[in-house]
Image (cartoon, rainbow, N blue to C red):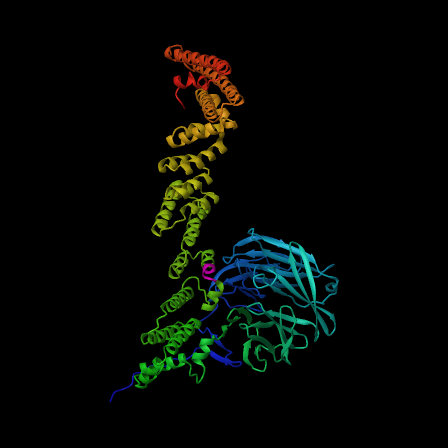
Amino acid sequence: MQRKRHYERTARCGSWISIGKDNMVRVLDFVDFSWDDSAWFKPKIACNRNGGHIAVHSQNKFYESDRNVVFLYTSNGKLSSTIKLKDSDVVSYLGWNYFQDHLIVVLGDGTAHFFNSRGEVAHSPFIIGVVNLVSSTQNGFAAVTFGASCLLSLVEFSKGGEYTSKTVSLPAPFSRPLSTLTLLAIPQNVSYTGYSEVLIPNTSTVNETKMFHCTISNQHLRCTNLKVSLEGGGLLSLALSSNGRSIAFLMESKNLFLTDTSFESVTQLFSVSNFLDKNMLSWCGNNCVVLGEREYEDDDYYTVHLVNTSDPSCTDNIGEVPGDVALVQECDGIRMISPTSYQFLQCVSESGVRVFSVGSRSPGAVLISTYDEFMSGNASAVGMLRHLQQNTDTLAEAINDCVLTAAMELDVEQQKCLLRIASFGKTFSPVQDTDSFLHTVRCLRVLNTLRATRPNMLLSLAQLQDLGEARLLQRLVRDDHYQIAYHVAETLDLEKDMVLREWAVSRLARSRTVMLSPQEEVTTCTAVIRKLKKCSCARIAEIAQEVNMRGKHDSAVQLLEAETCASRQIPMYLSISEPELALKRVAAVSDPDLAFTVIMFMLQSRAAGAVPLLLEKKLSRDIFLQLVRVTEGNRAYMRDFLNTKPHMQMALDLRRYLQEEDKLCAALANTRQEANWEMQQECKSAALQTLSLSQQREVAFSDGSHSSAAPSTTASQNAFHETMLRLQAKLIEKQTQLMKEMDDGRFLHASVVRHSAPRT
């Protein structure tokens, strides 16, 4: 008798909760999770979205020394660093700049401090005054300060690379104490105006609250009364959905409402009868609002209600949630963090609902059942598989649902199981969508690696897509995980040069903190260059520029010597003030454009002092002399140079004279009007006088520079040239006279200088 093989059938992970048709959430409990230090008491918890760090500041005294400490954990619960505060400091607000991965700590004295994810100071502190209400803008924070006047402050990271503060006064209705209990900042990436917006409720009477919409741009406050009156007392809490389109808010009357950002349509969702906590209001995705209540005020546990915004009658709840839990909103769910537990309330994707709903007959569910029967050795799997094969689109849909459901999972074994089922279905499908399958596999491999290795980054595929692959690399680089960032870029087929650049700059620039000998610095730079070449890095010149800006000039020069592309190497030599090396390199590659760039840079930076260097190389000398001829000594450095080189000045003057002769010949070829040739003759005469003066300066310079034992041939040559110039002057006078008498243009073509002196 043949025995059936033992096989554990595919089952869904976590505790699933249905809150309406096709709207399901599940609770994932990380049972293998434990905080490195869980001695918390009423902690302030701030979590950077999409797998970022978790900051925890507790009100109890942790240690005998360094009592006031902010702990930074990875998203998987590993302690990464600490931030020590003064014993007298009181933390009023703890939040994150999501785009820069900066932790923002606002103290009780009104000072805002900024730290990076390694616990280092990221920016100088701001003094904004004692804050009463704070809300994150994801790029900073908005704060309201009550005092002599009510002020709204907006502190955000600007494009200039630093934090800026904008403070404006709010209208008169806000001056009344306790008129505002909360506020909500709408980040600029989801706002309609393109600026960060702030919604501030104001309790005008005991039972009525008005809503104001504030926008700050260029120190100008635009505060608009939305003209909506909310009954039920003061407004306790506001929560923005993940897509930034809907707002849930809780009133003192213990009623939960839903509206859009303009408050045009307000709908009541839910009511509670017990004690509320305004911090226990959040969104799970875009269709579920989470609200926590206690049975009595000092209860140690919450009852968390899950309200379907599309159908408020469909609600459910989670009981016995720890009373010190913090809700951290993500794009696909909520992280529920407490000193003793770490859970994830996740929105189940549409594919997951189709595949794992009880009694589902969707193609994906049928494919899973078919695989289970096949692995169990049941013959019924053959009939089920043939049924799927009858329709190619049905089988393709089943495979796609299994792949998408695997992408939703955080458990590695469940991912493998679903991908194995999808691969099983692809065996019998004539339609092959390999790209989507492989991309999902690569992404899951990256996520599992990030969770299991040093970054200890716990995030889902939906969070990775919301974060972006480029931002993931930036986050890894900021935390000094260069090797993992490189392998992530390699796996996802991303640009690796950015990672290599940051690694090289960090390796070379940070050596400033360690006293290294020149030989050790050369050795370090050589090792970096060897690694960059091995990885085929094409940004060595950019790395050299960045290293030079960090004060490592010698390393920058050594890096540029390894750059093989002259068009990147030579301009970078100039940017780090090494024109001699640039000139040497441009002479080797013989590129006239680059040579002209180097010559102009040297002339502008060194003026006449650059001329001796330019005359050493043939290419630079030829281009420089052409430049001298074009400018004709009009620039100061040209005049200084020609004063020391009178023979070159004479050559230029001779060339100018010959050009005047050429102009005259061209004019005679077109017309013989008296005004034309007479004007050209005058120009020739003026040019000849200038040439004669240059000749005299050349003779004087030669007499002063040669010794008494100099050959007599030089003097005879100078005398010959002077005689030729005098003859040419007489010739011009005679030409003019004969032309006026005979009107014959042939007289104007005679020249003494043209046949006695070579062109230059």
Q: Give the range drawn in magenta.
A: 468-472
Looking at the rendering, in which quadrant would you find the C terminus? top left
Against 557, residue 726 (above or below) is: above
* Most common secondary structure along the magenta stretch: helix
Q: Can residue 127 be seen in this view?
A: no
Residue 735, percent across and down? 47, 15
Residue in front for this viewpoint, 302 or 612: 612
Q: Tell me: 431 left or right of 605.
A: left
Residue 509, percent across and down? 45, 47
Residue 389, percent across and down? 34, 80
Residue 123, percent across and down? 56, 53
Q: Which residue lies furthest to the left in this view?
A: 1
Q: Tell me: 468 left or right of 524.
A: right
Task: Determine if the magenta segment contains residue 575.
Answer: no
Looking at the rendering, in which quadrant would you find the N terminus? bottom left
**Residue in the picture at 38% in, 46% down:** 524
The quadrant holding residue 258 is bottom right
- Count of number-bearing discs: 0
Residue in front for this viewpoint, 563 or 682: 682
Q: Tell me: 41 left or right of 365.
A: right
The quadrant holding residue 127 is bottom right
Q: Can residue 390 be seen in this view?
A: yes
